[in-house]
Amino acid sequence: MTHLNNVKNSKNVSLSLWKGVDTVPIGPLKILLFTIKQPSQRQFHLDIDIEAQQIRSALIPFINAGWVKFYAPVDGYFSTLTQLLTTQEWHLVIISGHGLLKSNQTYLVFIDANDNKKLVTGNELAKILKKVRCVVLATCKSGELVKHNLIEPLVQIGIPNIIGMRESLLDRAARIFIQELCINLAQQKSINQAVQAGRLAMKNLLQPDEVWHKVNKAVPT
């Protein structure tokens, strides 16, 4: 495992890229944008629609040319993610939502059909992500390398490229990063180039007094 780009720039943007190989897939780039369901169903659908439409609009030239296939389901349950990953092949899987660091272990926080919280570990993710070429965990704490982390199990099963985030990023920060990452990969640029483009896009949207990480989670984003 090679750990690249684990640095903060002057505006406190911290992303980590674990990179194995960097090859361009044959055929259309298949992208799955999966947003984890949150308890507020109405706001959840609104947020998914906005995020998915922005990314889809940016990718329209590549979709129309047959270079990209893009899917963003509305159902954000873990069972749905499992079904999509075990029955179809994806090159790029982006999981957007909330992460948690608890007792030296990181989790993705899902909600089931009864609005009960489900904490998903890296080992559980590894069971369903075996065929994926690049995974983006767009959740806070996903890049934290504590004893039981989300990254190491994915590395162990041979996923070539894994991108995690250390900070509790503002939603619009994660959104612009994901958009630029997808566009650059659609242009057949390398993972490293795509990550750098995403970082630059985040930095360029900042106001002079802003940082991208959430200092106070009660402040609206």
Image: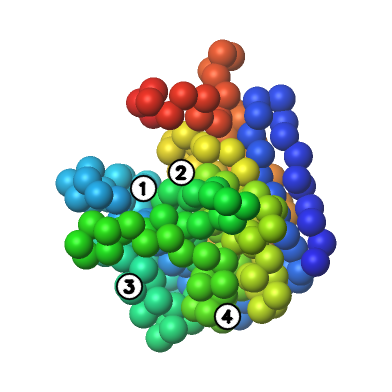
Left of 122 or right of it: where is 61? left
Nearest to the eye among marks 4 and 1: give it.
4
Amino acid carrying label 4: it is Lys
Q: Earlier in the sequence, mark 3 or mark 1?
A: 1
**Which residue is label 3 attached to?**
80
The reply to whether discs 2 and 3 touch (Cβ–Cβ < 8 Å) is no
Give the residue type at disc 3: Thr
What residue do we see at 60% from left, 61% from top? 150
Residue 71 coordinates in the image, percent (x, y): 37, 66
Rounded to the nearest angstrom, the CA distance separating label 4 from label 2 is 25 Å
Task: Compare marks 3 and 4 and give the one earlier in the sequence.
Answer: 3
**Residue found at the very far bottom of the displayed protein:** 87
Mark 3 is surrounded, within 10 Å at the Cα level, by few (under 14), some (14 to 19) or many (20 or more) other residues, namely: few
Which residue was labeled with disc 2? 175
Tag 1 or tag 4, which sits nearer the N-term? 1
Q: Secondary structure at mark 3?
A: helix
